[in-house]
Amino acid sequence: MARKNASDDPLAPVTLAVGQEELLLNRAVREVVAAAKATDPDTDVRDLTPDQLQPGTLAELVSPSLFAERKVVVVRGAQDLSADTVKDVKAYLASPAEEITLVLLHAGGAKGKGLLDAARKVGAREVACPKMTKPADRLAFVRGEFRTTGRSATPEACQALVDAIGSDLRELASAVTQLVADVEGTIDEAVVGRYYTGRAEASSFTVADRAVEGRTAEALEALRWSLSTGVAPVLITSALAQGVRAIGKLSSARGGRPADLARELGMPPWKIDRVRQQMRGWTPDGVSVALRAVAEADAGVKGGGDDPEYALEKAVVTIARAARSRGRA
């Protein structure tokens, strides 16, 4: 899980979340927002990307309010801020305002290191959110997830879960949540085996991958198994949305190396390569059709329809057909 420094007050004037693990970065943001809203339910939250934070914007956001309202200002991709905006942020760091919590999300590394150093110099609360590339790190993450819920899992169960699910922290966290909700007492290897062993490929993200690749039968098989093992339908619609949006973003992006596109689109380079392979049969009209299908499925699983499973199956079939739209043109 994310590691924090000694100053562990989520309402510290500045929180610096450093790393490239999206799940941990988002959790760092949620922790600050939750703490602020617990203090003041009317807290104003502004979540900004580098292109939204132009020179002068920060000064407007942190200017004193007549009502002394609490604010949380989140700056994502701080390493990509323009030089002039970095000057604004550094000036603010020297004298942060009361009732305002600034959250800087920084990938780490050499790019934008001056801002990183400036935040550390003023004693910013720091949350480390590194990519977990080693199996031992993922195993520690799973153990931490169980500890956070107050539930007990055997070492063998934790290892079996990592072996079955793989490297995606979102899927690991979701699996822990599902097991804790469904199983009483200590969670052991046998329980994990019943839920996940041998079918690790049947995750929400695999459903999405097979759908955007146009592999209808495999996508439906993965969908049905995911639902039968307790994967929440809302997680599947979320994965479908991410898959289709990735196709749309990359298809409209300028050509270039995966590393350059990764910076432009906010995706890791390995995902750029995967999406490039998946997008071969797609057209702009196909992306539009697929996004509408995802929206309809999302409404269906959130109470807008009588049969969430049917809503998901319909979306998967529509997306898979859209993935082959270029071949039918």
Image (spheres, rainbow, N blue to C red):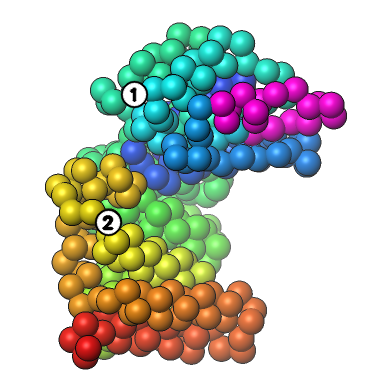
Disc 2: CA contacts within 10 A as few (<14), some (14-19) or many (>=20): few
Q: Nearer the viewer, residue 110 or 52?
A: 52
Disc 1: CA contacts within 10 A as few (<14), some (14-19) or many (>=20): some
Q: Nearer the viewer, residue 65 or 316?
A: 65
Looking at the rendered image, the quarter that the C terminus falls into is: bottom left
Q: Position of residue 22 (x, y in %)?
A: 39, 45
Q: Amino acid at mark 2?
A: Ala
Label 1, on which residue?
A: 112
Q: Residue drawn 84% across and 26% down?
A: 66
In the displayed structure, would residue 79 be above or below residue 233? above
Q: Position of residue 255 (x, y in %)?
A: 18, 54
Q: State the SS at label 2.
A: loop
Q: Residue drawn 78% across and 41% down?
A: 42
Q: Amino acid at mark 1?
A: Gly
Q: Is residue 100 visible?
A: yes
Label 2, on which residue?
A: 253
As drawn, is 328 to the left or to the right of 56? left
Q: Residue drawn 58% across and 77% down?
A: 299
Magenta stretch contains residue 67:
yes
Q: Is residue 6 visible?
A: no
As drawn, is 181 to the left or to the right of 324? right
Give the spatial CA distance, label 1 vs label 2: 24 Å
Looking at the rendered image, the quarter that the N terminus falls into is: top left
In the displayed structure, would residue 181 be above or below residue 268? below
The number of numbered discs placed on residues in the rendered structure image is: 2
1 or 2: mark nearer the eye:
2
Q: Position of residue 252 (x, y in %)?
A: 29, 61
Q: What are the residue bounds of the magenta stretch?
A: 56-72
Q: Residue drawn 78% across and 36% down?
A: 40
Q: State the SS at label 1.
A: loop
